[in-house]
Image: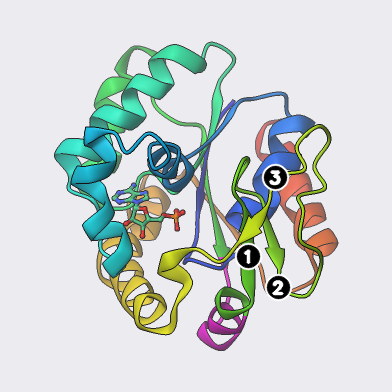
Amino acid sequence: MKLILLGAPGAGKGTQALSLSEKFDIPWMSSGDLFRSHRKENTDLWKQSFGYIEKGLLVPDSITINMVLSWIDENSNKGFLLDGFPRNIYQAESLETHLDNSSGIDKAIYISVPDEILIDRLSSRVVCKVCGIPYTKSDKNKCTVKACTGELYQREDDKPESIKKRLQVFMDETKPLIEYYNFRDKLIQIDGSGTVESVRESLESSILISNK
Ligand code: AMP
């Protein structure tokens, strides 16, 4: 299965991705986590990307697309679950072209959540430094994913100015993808405003139905 998770920042893509990738036995890639994995070594890729990430802007396509397509080539023989990519039409088309021999992705799942809830979630979010799994600030201070125990921290782009910018970028650049995939009959839409468990159930059942 080749799946894409679409949704505004804070919609719950990262929260749902790990269990979906385990349930359907497909590797998960978060493009934001791929960027952040370069921070510790302060690689050239991080130096070129950090300024955009900090301001809540999209990293240029020329950097992002190469990074993600290389990940796909190295990891996706069983399919994939992409979280955070594509984020604009150009990225979506580059992905389709790259997957040309295999007729593209199977489904793009849009997790829809009202803005008030997104802002609330992002302002109280901390994430694991090691695996990127998100938690709520007051929850705990170490990651609880098996064999991880990474420290939790607030992302630099979860500060109020960047949150506002990221939501605007989502509206302007990423939301057109909903129509793009709908037109190609590949869109599944899920209400992401409920509890983690209820959203997970809707996601899993709609993927199972669409895969029949
Ligand atoms: P995320 O962890 O998905 O919220 O991504 C954090 C930041 O990484 C975004 O605000 C962008 O600056 C950058 N980023 C992640 N994915 C992409 C992408 N597909 N295209 C451009 N920039 C991206």
Q: CA distance from mark 2 to mark 3?
A: 15 Å
What is the crowding at mark 2: few (fewer than 14 residues within 10 Å), some, or many (at least 20)? some
Q: Are marks 2 and 1 in contact (CB under 8 Å)?
A: yes
* Residue 58 counted in the magenta span: no
Q: Residue at x 49, y 63 (%)?
A: 155
Residue 132 vs residue 150, the one in the foreground: 150
Residues packed near mark 1 inside 10 Å, few (<14), some (14 to 19) or many (20 plus): many
Foreground of the two, 209 or 65: 65
Nearest to N terminus: mark 2 or mark 1: 1
Could you tell me residue 15's position as x and y percent?
A: 68, 54
- Residue at 17% x, 48% y is 60
Residue 103 shows in this picture: no
Comparing marks 1 and 3, which lies closer to the viewer? 3
> What is the magenta range?
112-120
Vertical placement of residue 103 versus 89, above or below: above
Mark number, residue 137: 2
Residue at figure coordinates x 36%, y 75% from the top left:
162
Mark 3 residue element: loop
Disc with the residue nearer the chain's start (2 vs 3): 2
Give the labeled residue for mark 1.
126
Q: Is residue 114 magenta?
A: yes
